[in-house]
Image (cartoon, rainbow, N blue to C red):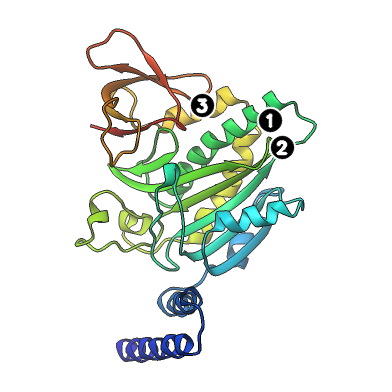
């Protein structure tokens, strides 16, 4: 039976790890071996052919580097970028990360071979002046949020919405997060995590704050379809001017007119300068305009400086 085979496979895996440790193999290497076996055993690996067949892009996703286990896809992309090769549109995808990171230093948790964890490289022409290059990189942040929300809606999560600055939520629970690192003025490394087929146990504290596409639609979702639609949307959106991108971003927004808590340290840590406010508008550059409780003035928030949560 499947359960018997699963038990035997786990026993063999444990034996391999013990033998590897006894032979002096580093703990990380032994753990990586376990994750590789776990990925193959538990879920089908990513089908690169099915993904490629759904791409409509010129560059994004045409180069895909696939791994079962890595420390971080962002670190892989950084190492590749440091070599100076033309990586525009390249994607680094892993089934499992041992050191995935989100915004403001948070860890990114995920189950093996069930979600999407990837970093893609976006470059702009080196001939662009610094100001224009930075405007393109700023636009990329908002395009990622919009592309992710549309990709989730494409497979059935009809209420996928954007929580400023760049998370995607569905009916009060988080579906996706992202982080963009700049390598100079003309190269962006965008790390994205999307909960696709993650079965979060009700006993797991994360079940109160996170969800997955499969949980929303009631069955397995094609990761290949989600990622291909994301790539197609990114190229479409990045060809638009910033005002048009923000118009689409506004159409997906979930917080406008609502009260939020503004956190200066993190959402998990209270700070004396934290306060409640009402989300009032978006600035032209994507900043969030809020009106603090008890005040007639407005404040423009920047995503690299603060975090918010609905209250």
Reading the image, the residue beneath label 1 is 133
Q: Residue furthest top?
A: 296
Residue depth check, mark 1 versus mark 3: number of the one nearer the observer: 1
Residue 192, compared with residue 10, is above or below; it is: above
Circles 1 and 2 in contact, beta carbons < 8 Å: yes
Q: Find numbered disc 1 in the image and state the secondary structure of the residue it sits on.
A: helix
Label of residue 217 in the image: none
* Residue 92, position as x, y percentages in the image: 60, 58
Q: How many neighbours does mark 2 have within 10 angstroms: few (below 14), some (14-19), or many (20 or more)? A: some
Measure how far apart labels 1 and 3 are at the Cα level: 18 Å
Residue 155, compared with residue 202, is above or below; it is: above
Circles 1 and 3 in contact, beta carbons < 8 Å: no
Decide which of 150, 42 is in the foreground and name it.
42
Q: Is residue 153 visible?
A: no
Measure how far apart labels 1 and 2 are at the Cα level: 7 Å
Drawn side of residue 259 relative to residue 300, left or right:
left
Q: How many neighbours does mark 1 have within 10 angstroms: few (below 14), some (14-19), or many (20 or more)? A: some
Q: Find numbered disc 2 in the image and state the secondary structure of the residue it sits on.
A: loop
At a point 44% along the width and 27% down the height, the residue shown is: 250
Upstream in sequence: badge 1 or badge 3: 1
Label of residue 246 in the image: 3
Reading the image, the residue beneath label 2 is 124
At a point 28% along the width and 31% down the height, the residue shown is: 271
């Amino acid at each position: 039976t499947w359960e018997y085979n699963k038990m035997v496979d786990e026993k063999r895996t444990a034996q391999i790890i013990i033998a590897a440790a006894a032979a002096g193999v580093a703990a990380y290497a032994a753990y990586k071996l376990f994750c590789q076996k776990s990925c193959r055993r538990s879920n089908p690996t990513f089908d690169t052919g099915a993904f490629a067949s759904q791409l409509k892009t010129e560059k994004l996703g045409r180069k895909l580097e696939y791994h079962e286990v890595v420390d971080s896809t962002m670190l892989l992309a950084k190492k590749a970028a440091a070599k100076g090769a033309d990586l525009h549109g390249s994607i680094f995808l892993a089934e499992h990360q041992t050191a995935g990171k989100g915004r403001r230093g948070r860890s990114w948790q995920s189950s093996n071979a069930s979600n999407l964890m990837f970093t893609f490289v976006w470059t702009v022409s080196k001939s662009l002046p610094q100001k224009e290059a930075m405007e393109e990189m700023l636009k990329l942040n908002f395009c990622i949020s919009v592309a992710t929300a549309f990709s989730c809606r494409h497979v059935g999560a009809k209420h996928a919405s954007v929580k400023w600055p760049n998370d995607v939520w569905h009916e009060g629970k988080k579906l996706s997060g992202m982080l963009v690192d700049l390598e100079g003025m003309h190269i962006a490394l965008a790390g994205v995590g999307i909960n696709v087929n993650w079965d979060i146990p009700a006993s797991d504290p994360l079940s109160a704050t996170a969800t997955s596409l499969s949980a929303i639609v009631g069955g397995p979702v094609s990761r290949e379809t989600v990622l291909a639609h994301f790539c197609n949307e990114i190229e479409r959106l990045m060809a638009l001017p910033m005002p048009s991108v923000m118009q689409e971003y506004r159409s997906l927004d979930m917080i406008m007119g609502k009260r939020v808590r503004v956190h200066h340290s993190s959402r998990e840590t209270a700070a004396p300068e934290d306060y409640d406010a009402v989300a009032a508008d978006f600035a032209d550059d994507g900043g969030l305009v809020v009106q603090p409780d008890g005040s007639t003035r407005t404040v423009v928030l920047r995503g690299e400086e603060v975090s918010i949560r609905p209250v």
